[in-house]
Image (tube, rainbow, N blue to C red):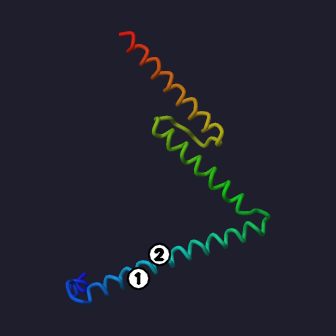
Amino acid sequence: MEFMSLYHGSYLSPIIDEYFRYQLLMTRVDEISSVEEKVNNLLNVLKDIGLDFNWLLGIVSLSAQEIAIKKKLDELGESYGEEDFQKLADKLIKSMEERIKHRVFLSGLKSML
């Protein structure tokens, strides 16, 4: 911070700003390269055991759906344990159906009053 304040307002300030932006960009490029390398390593291992990118994509999609279902169950105040995916999905559907029926019933009562 002190280093940058020395050059603030001088003709070097834009050059120094660009240097720091470049360093930040290169750090991000290195991070992306590292992730890409890890994914490539994973795909090579999957290939060795007869699996492919489609299998990986399917697993990631199912995991994301399970996380979303559990998050919604938490929001609705529903408890769940270590249940399989289908039971979790059924519990969410049932909970949402009950809430919709309850809202429809309440709106019907309000319209009668």
Local secondary structure at mark 2: helix
44 versus 108 height, above or below: below
Residue at image x 25%, y 81%? 1
**Residue at mark 1 to residue at mark 2: CA–CA distance:** 9 Å
**Residue 91 placement (x, y as % from top left):** 58, 33
91 versus 5 height, above or below: above
The residue lying toward the viewer, choosing from 2 and 91, is: 2
Numbered-mark total: 2
Q: Which residue is mark 2?
A: 28
Q: Which three-letter amino acid code belongs to the residue tagged 1?
A: Gln
Q: Earlier in the sequence, mark 1 or mark 2?
A: 1
Question: In the image, 11: left or right of 74?
Answer: left
Q: Which three-letter amino acid code belongs to the residue tagged 2?
A: Arg
Using the rendered view, name the quadrant where residue 8 is placed: bottom left
Residue at image x 50%, y 77%? 29
Which residue extends farthest right?
50
Residue at image x 51%, y 38%? 73
Local secondary structure at mark 1: helix
57 versus 31 height, above or below: above
**Residue 87 placement (x, y as % from top left):** 64, 37
Task: Kindly indicate whether the residue at mark 2 contacts the one at mark 1 (C-beta within 8 angstroms).
Answer: no
Q: Which residue is mark 1?
A: 23
Pointer 1: residues within 10 angstroms few (<14), some, or many (20+)?
A: few
Question: In the image, 61: left or right of 14?
Answer: right
